[in-house]
Amino acid sequence: MGVVPGALDARGERLAGPIFTGVGLAGLAACAFWGSGLRGVTLVVAVAAAVWVPLLIPLFPHRRTHPWLAAGYYAGVLAAATVLVANDDSFMGFASFGYPLAFVLFPARWGFFAVAATATLPLLAANSDSRSPTWVLVLSMAGPLLYAAWFVGAESEQRRKANVRLEAALEENANLHAQLLTQAREAGVLDERQRMAREIHDTIAQGLTGIVTQLQAADGPDRDRRLAQVRVLARESLGEARRAVQALRPEPLAEAQLPEALSRLAARVAGTSGADVRAETTGDARPLLPDLEETLYRVAQEALANAEKHAKASRIALTLSYSDDLVLLDVVDDGVGFRDGDRGEGTGFGLEAMRQRVRRVAGTLAIESAPGGGTAVSAQVPAIPA
C-alpha cells in the first residue's frame, strides 16, 4: 500500500478501507474507555459514530468517482467528533482520526482544507473547564503536525523518484534518438548506393555493352549502320549517366509517355539485335506516378537486354496493360531460357535490381523460364495516377 495518498496500488485499494475503519473504531473505543463515561448525548453519538465509521469500507473504492459521497461521509465523522469532544474532550483522540482520513478520501489540496476543519472545530467545541489526560493533549496538538510532515516528506520523496525516472527516460530516449539517426543515415547511404548501382547497370553498363557489340560487328557490310548505332548508344549513355547522378527521370520518359517510350525502346532493341521485337499497349493508358513509370521502364529495359544478350531470342513480345487498380508489364521471349532451379532466384545483378525496383513501389515481379522454352518476365505495380 503506497504511503502517499492517491498513490495506492491495487492491494492498497483493497485493504485501505478496512484498515482505516479499524483505526477509527479503535480510537473511538480507546477514548470511550479513558473518558469520563458514556451517558446521555455522548452515548448516543458514540453509538452512531460506531455505526457510521464502517461505512468507509463500501465507500472507499468509489471516493474518486463520487466525491460528494466522500465529503458527506467525512462531514459525518467530523460532526460526531465535534459533538463528542464538546461533551468529553477525551474524544480528541477520535477527532485525530480525521487527519489521515482527510488525505485518503480527498485530493491533496482539498485534503488540507479537511485537515484544517478537523483541527479547528473540535478544539473550538472542547469544554475549556475539563481536565484532559496528557496523552490526549499531545495527540491533538502533535498529531496533525506529525502527519502533515509525514505527508509532505512522502510526497516530496515520490516526486524526487519520479524526477530521477524521468531523467533516466530522457537520457535513454536521447540515446535511442542518436541510434535512430545513425541507422537512418546508414540506410540512406545504402539506399543511394543501391540506386546508383541500379542506374549504372540499367544505363551506362547496358549502353557500353551495346557499343561493344556494335563495334564487334562493324567489320561487315553494314559497317556504317553499326557505327551510327554506336553514336546513338554513346549519346544516350552519356545522357543517362548525367541523369543518374542528378536523380532525374530516364531521358525517354522525360520526352514521351510510358507507352511511347517503351515502343521506342523496343524499336532500338530490334535495330541492335536483329530480333523481331513488338510492343503493345492495352487498356486505358494514363500517366502514373513518376516512380512507377520509371520502374516499369527499367524492368522492360533489363528484360529486353537479357533477351538480347543472354537468351539469344529471335522474337520478343512486350505488353503494357492498364486496368483500374493495376498496371502490368509482360516481356516474353523465345530464347534459350534457364534451368528451373534458377527460376526466381536471379542469375546476376540485373534480375535482383529488377526485384528491388518493383518492391520499392509496392509491386510484384514474377520470372518464368525453362531450358529451350524462353523466358517470361511479369511486373505488376499499383495504378496510382500522377
Image: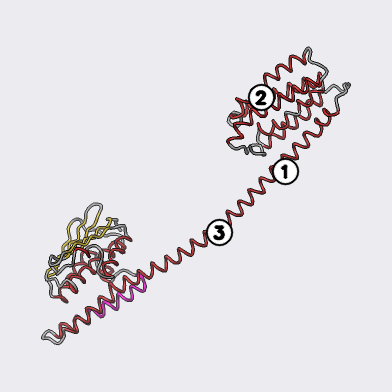
Q: Position of residue 293 (x, y in %)?
A: 27, 63
Seen at 89% across and 21% down, the residue is 129
Q: Which residues are magenta?
A: 229-247
| Mark before the other along the chain sequence, 3 or 1 | 1
Relative placement, left or right, of 152 versus 221 is right
Instruction: Give the vertical position of 295 relative to 310 (above or below).
Output: above
Relative placement, left or right, of 116 versus 243 is right
Q: Which mark is residue 73?
A: 2
* Amino acid type of the residue tagged 1 in the rendering: Gly
* Amino acid type of the residue tagged 3 in the rendering: Ala
Which residue is outermost to the top? 40
The quadrant in which residue 366 appears is: bottom left
Dot 1 alpha-carbon crowd within 10 angstroms: few under 14, some 14 to 19, many 20 or more = few
Q: Position of residue 189 (x, y in %)?
A: 42, 69
* Amino acid type of the residue tagged 2 in the rendering: Tyr
Q: Secondary structure at mark 2?
A: helix
| Mark before the other along the chain sequence, 2 or 3 | 2
Nearest to viewer (mark 1 / mark 2) = 1
Dot 3 alpha-carbon crowd within 10 angstroms: few under 14, some 14 to 19, many 20 or more = few
Compare residues 204 and 193 and report the one nearer the observer.
193
The quadrant in which residue 216 appears is: bottom left
Q: Which mark is residue 174?
A: 3
Q: Position of residue 75 (x, y in %)?
A: 69, 24
Please give the residue where the numbered disc 1 appears in the rendered image. 153
Q: Is residue 239 magenta?
A: yes
| Mark before the other along the chain sequence, 1 or 2 | 2
Color theme of the render: secondary structure
Compare residues 160 and 19 and report the one nearer the observer.
19
* Quadrant, the N terminus: top right
Distance between mark 1 and mark 2 Cα atoms: 27 Å
